[in-house]
Image: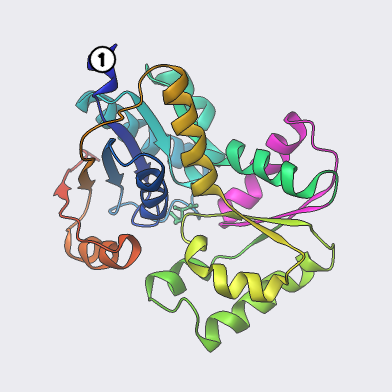
Amino acid sequence: MRRLGGLPIGVFDSGVGGLTVLRALRREMPSERLLYFGDTARVPYGTKSKETVTRYALEVAAFLEGRGVKHLVVACNSATALALPALRRAARVPVTGVIEPAVRAARRAARDGVVGVIGTEATVASGAYQEAWTKSGGRGRVVSAACPLFVPLVEEGWWDTEVTRAVARVYLRPLLKARPRALILGCTHYPLLKPVLSRCAGPKVALIDSGSETAAEVRLELESRGLLRRAGRGTEGFFVTDGPERFKRLAHRFLGHAADPRVVRFEG
Ligand code: DGL
């Protein structure tokens, strides 16, 4: 058991955005070993079909499992929305996605009121949040909006600019008409837009950061299985599927410290 606890947690995303989830995991679990995989050659996942994203996600998960991990975290909302059941069937270790923890937090915040969800086109079209909401016994309505321009704006570093504020107003206006009590930030990049989004949504709407909620649940799960690493300094390893330069540049911005990834090439 002690040896299993010493294994890393595998975290995967379509690219750099999942580093917001990595940061949340690090905050929750300072001693854990974290292995991050960004599928930078095939990003974005948020515009692709379920079949394609599932194929990519299974490939990445198998790679991480092959490195020896004790738990897999699907940091990418689009991969969670489209591929979580397939990942859970295929993996030998427990798999946590970002949708269920966010829905549980939204239920606590919104009770039976309306909940808003924003995410990529694929996440919103999948209906995965609505499904998780209904499964969890949520009664209020779920209203959602795809916000595809947010990802490039965040990667450009335009977290709180006039353009970003204008785009946020256009995307959120119809959703806010439904008067949500909580708004789920259903994409890896959106926590970096929190100041803009909270000003746009107003003080009555609780913003739910799916990465932080997921990190808290992963910690509880590892604790309950006796697998939480409690002592020692945490370590981080990074893998990408395309040239590392852009990842390195953005990682510094997303994580606040340097990341030096190894490049992995998948066939086909
Ligand atoms: N990581 C994706 C997500 O959270 C955003 C980027 C992409 O479309 O791949 O949905």
**Does residue 87 appear to the left or right of 10 in the view shown?**
right
Q: Is residue 5 visible?
A: yes
Image coordinates for residue 172, horizontal then vertical, percent: 70, 70
In the rendered image, the quadrant that contains the N terminus is: top left
Residue drawn where x is 35% and y is 26% of the image = 228
Residue placed at 25% from the left, 31% from the top? 231
Residue 205, horizontal then vertical, whole percent: 74, 62
Q: Is 3 a magenta residue?
A: no
Magenta segment: 114-143
Q: Is residue 188 above or below residue 36?
A: below
Q: How many marks?
A: 1
Percent position of residue 148, x then y: 54, 65
User: Closer to the camera, 16 or 254?
Assistant: 254
Q: Quadrant of residue 16?
A: bottom left
Q: Quadrant of residue 71?
A: top left
Tell which residue pokes out farthest to the top in this image: 1
Type of amino acid at the residue the image marks with label 1: Arg
From the image, tell me which residue sits under label 1.
2
* Quadrant, the C terminus: top left
For residue 127, say whether it is visible: no
Which residue is found at the position 39% from the left and 20% from the top?
A: 91
Residue located farthest toward the front when viewing the structure as drawn: 231
Say which residue appears at 34% left-offset and 54% top-offset. Answer: 15
Q: Quadrant of residue 104?
A: top right
Q: Is residue 121 magenta?
A: yes
